[in-house]
């Protein structure tokens, strides 16, 4: 009996090893296929999963807003944390009620801020809400928003909020889209220092959590950025992927090394990536009343 | 027929878990690191049925994590990580009834192996987000958070899996 059990155990182990081996091979094959140059063969699968899970994320995020609002209420900026805790202690009985009202108020403030910014800048925008946030465990900084191709959101559009530049759309399904935040290590934005009009590139610092400082390198190495300078987007042809003139952040530190040709600076973004809620996707820029659309040729779900 | 129903039930468990993880529990992220309920499902599968089943559940859960928005990394990386986690957790699982301390240690080891394998594949593929600093920052915090949720989440997942998949040999 014991012998039989041991034999069965051995057979099971061998079977498990074979199956695990096959699954590892399958995973490696998927990685290889997806990282091959050109259009990924995995894209259709990605589109299907996004089309199914995106709306569910949207519904779950909306339905559980009173719960999800709770941690957001206590988080955001560190300096607010102590004050928040004090307030929470003051009226614990009303906490649940307060959180719901507070979240709604924050959201409405955010929308007011965005519409003020939109009026001033002349952008045509589509408002959207962040419904999913990628974890730091994936070493990237992306979010899902609840607007997609049906609302006019296609890849390579600029995403902003009331504070400034958030990122750009990298994939879109019918009702949801994925936004690459400018803090992601894969992100590069053309920036211009407001004071001197000098051009440079802002790379996501690869800071996986928190503020997500950016690294600015200037094209002209004879110019040095100053602490406190404001950096705005420089924009590109037809406003894709970034429209011009959106505030990005302020210079908080300057580094130069003789070995490097360009001066680099650390830029602290205006947007608080840890408490993103309502954002606006720029679908067009009004010039003298007329609206010019950025190219919408980029197909569904393509990544640049 | 019964088998198809069981597979569908486990698939539903995986999809619901991951959807909630990405849309609700992302708000509970501590400085970016969010609780990883998908990993808890894989460890629970290992405890319920052993390495073979857990590797299959790991592959499925990993693949959904790889493809679900807002994922932007190369697909297959979480699938690979979770196959390894499921298989190893299934082998490491003690025979008979394991203690709660042992189960939570298994979650800790699983979280460590899972995030590390994911980070390693990122290094191999040249993912710019994966740096020594970010790995040493994220991996310990991910393990810590998963250990923190394990006492609540693991019994839930174990109960759910036992319901759909009654223990066969174990």
Image (spheres, coloured by chain):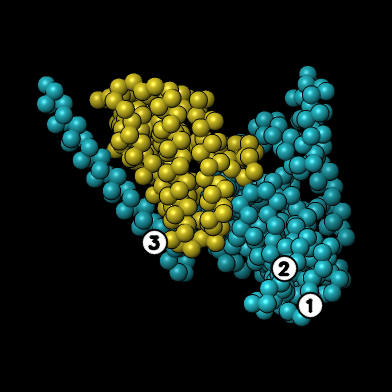
The quarter of the rendered structure image containing the C terminus of chain A is bottom right
Residue A153 in the image, given as x and y percentages of width and height: 66, 57
- Proximity of marks 2 and 3: CB atoms separated by less than 8 Å: no
Residue A9 in the image, given as x and y percentages of width and height: 19, 31
- Number of numbered callouts drawn: 3
| Disc 2 with disc 3 on a shared chain | yes
The quarter of the rendered structure image containing the N terminus of chain A is top left
Q: Is residue A195 left or right of residue B50?
A: right
Dot 1 lies on which element?
loop
- The quadrant holding residue B33 is top right
Examine the rendered structure and indicate whether residue B98 appears above or below residue A300: above
Q: Which residue is mark 3?
A: A32
Name the disc covering residue A85, or none: none
Dot 2 lies on which element?
strand
Write the residue at 85% across / 56% down.
Answer: A117
Between the C-alphas of marks 1 and 3, the distance is 43 Å
Name the disc covering residue A255, or none: 2
N-term-proximal mark, 1 vs 3 = 3
* Chain of the residue on which disc 3 is drawn: A
User: Color of chain B here?
Assistant: yellow
Q: Which residue is mark 1?
A: A223
Taking the view exactly as shown, the residue that stands out farthest to the top is A93
Q: Is residue A14 left or right of residue B32?
A: left
Q: Which chain is cyan?
A: A
- The residue nearer to you, when weighing A155 against B55, is B55
């Amino acid at each position: 009996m014991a012998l039989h059990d041991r034999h069965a155990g051995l057979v099971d182990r061998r079977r498990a090893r074979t199956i695990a081996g096959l699954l590892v091979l399958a995973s490696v094959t998927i990685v290889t296929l997806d990282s091959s140059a050109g259009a990924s063969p995995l894209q259709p699968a990605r589109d299907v999963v996004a089309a199914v899970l995106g709306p569910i994320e949207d519904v779950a995020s909306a339905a559980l807003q009173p719960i999800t609002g709770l941690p957001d209420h206590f988080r955001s900026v560190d300096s607010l944390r102590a004050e928040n805790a004090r307030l929470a202690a003051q009226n614990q009985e009303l906490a649940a009620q307060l959180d719901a009202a507070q979240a709604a108020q924050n959201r409405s403030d955010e929308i007011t801020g965005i519409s003020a910014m939109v009026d001033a800048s002349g952008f045509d925008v589509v408002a959207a809400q962040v419904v999913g946030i990628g974890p730091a465990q994936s070493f990237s900084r992306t979010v899902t928003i609840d607007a997609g191709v049906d609302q006019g959101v296609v890849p390579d559009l600029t995403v902003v909020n009331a504070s400034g530049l958030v990122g750009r759309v990298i994939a879109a399904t019918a009702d949801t889209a994925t936004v690459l935040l400018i803090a992601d290590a894969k992100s590069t934005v053309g920036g211009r220092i407001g004071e001197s009009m000098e051009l440079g590139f802002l790379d996501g610092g690869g800071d996986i959590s928190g503020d997500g400082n950016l690294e600015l390198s200037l094209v002209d190495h004879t110019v040095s950025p100053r602490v406190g300078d404001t950096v705005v987007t420089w924009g590109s042809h037809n406003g894709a992927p970034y429209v011009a003139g959106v505030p990005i952040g302020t210079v908080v530190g300057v580094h130069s090394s003789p070995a490097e040709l360009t001066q680099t600076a650390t830029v602290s973004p205006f947007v608080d990536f840890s408490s993103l809620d309502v954002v606006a996707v720029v679908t067009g820029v009004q010039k003298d009343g007329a609206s010019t659309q950025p190219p919408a040729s980029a197909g569904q779900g393509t990544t640049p | 027929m019964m088998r198809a129903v069981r597979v569908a039930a486990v698939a539903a468990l995986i999809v619901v878990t991951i959807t909630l993880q990405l849309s609700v529990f992302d708000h509970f992220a501590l400085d970016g690191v969010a609780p990883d309920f998908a990993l808890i499902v894989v460890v629970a599968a290992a405890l319920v049925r052993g390495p073979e089943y857990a590797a299959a559940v790991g592959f499925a859960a990993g693949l959904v994590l790889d493809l679900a928005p807002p994922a932007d990394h190369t697909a297959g990386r979480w699938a690979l990580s979770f196959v390894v986690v499921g298989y190893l957790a299934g082998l490491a699982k003690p025979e008979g009834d394991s203690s709660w301390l042992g189960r939570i240690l298994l979650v800790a080891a699983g979280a460590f192996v899972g995030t590390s394998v994911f980070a390693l594949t990122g290094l191999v593929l040249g993912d710019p987000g994966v740096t020594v600093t970010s790995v040493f920052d994220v991996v310990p915090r991910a393990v810590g958070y998963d250990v923190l949720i394990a006492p609540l989440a693991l019994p839930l997942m174990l109960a759910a899996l036992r319901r759909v998949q009654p223990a066969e040999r174990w």
